[in-house]
Amino acid sequence: VQLVESGGGLVQVGGSLRLSCTTSGFNFGDYVIGWFRQAPGKEREGVSTISGHDGSSYVVPSVRGRFTIASDNTKKLVYLQMNSLKYEDTAVYYCAAEPIDYKTGWGLIAPIPRTDFRSWGQGTQVTVSS
């Protein structure tokens, strides 16, 4: 499983960025892909997930309405569109992958993100400034 994030950078408050996660080495349809972030001095937190099974998505309440997750299953890409960025969105953003558990049903629809996903990218820095 390989995951490579891109698209981070410096953006002004109120601006937008689109992060991309390029995936390889696994069957996209059998995985949940999640976006997570870690701000300086804080624990890593989940932002959003998308299920490769049905394309459903989940966005945590703190960024809902500003962030959107989407995937291109053909290209095995997952995007995180971030609008109306705030100072507190400054963090390293990671994408991660976890296999769907067909026995329990976890991941058949997009789950609330949890930080124990097994496979992670290297992260991309997002800095929001004035």
Image (spheres, rainbow, N blue to C red):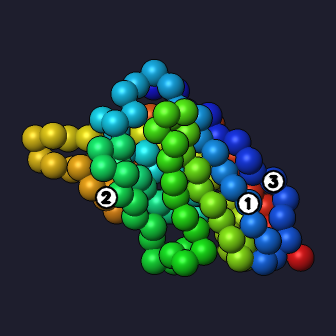
Name the mark on residue 111: 2
- Circle 3 crowding by C-alpha within 10 Å: few under 14, some 14–19, many from 20: some
User: Quick one: label 2 or label 1, which is nearer the N terminus?
Assistant: 1
- Quadrant (top left, top right, bottom left, bottom right) of the N terminus: top left
Residue 66 on image: x %, y %:
60, 74
Residue for point 12% across, 47% down: 104
Type of the residue with mark 2:
Pro
109 vs 114, left or right, is left
Type of the residue with mark 3:
Gly
Residue 13 on image: x %, y %:
81, 76
Question: Mark 1 = which residue?
Answer: 17
Residue situated in front as seen by the camera: 71 or 99: 71
Q: CA distance from mark 1 to mark 3?
A: 8 Å
Marks 1 and 3 close (CB-CB < 8 Å): yes
Name the mark on residue 98: none
User: Quick one: label 1 or label 3, which is nearer the N terminus?
Assistant: 3
Q: Secondary structure at mark 2?
A: loop
Q: Residue furthest left?
A: 103
Type of the residue with mark 1:
Leu
Q: CA distance from mark 3 to mark 2?
A: 28 Å
Residue 23 on image: x %, y %:
53, 32
Q: Secondary structure at mark 3?
A: strand
Question: Mark 3 = which residue?
Answer: 9
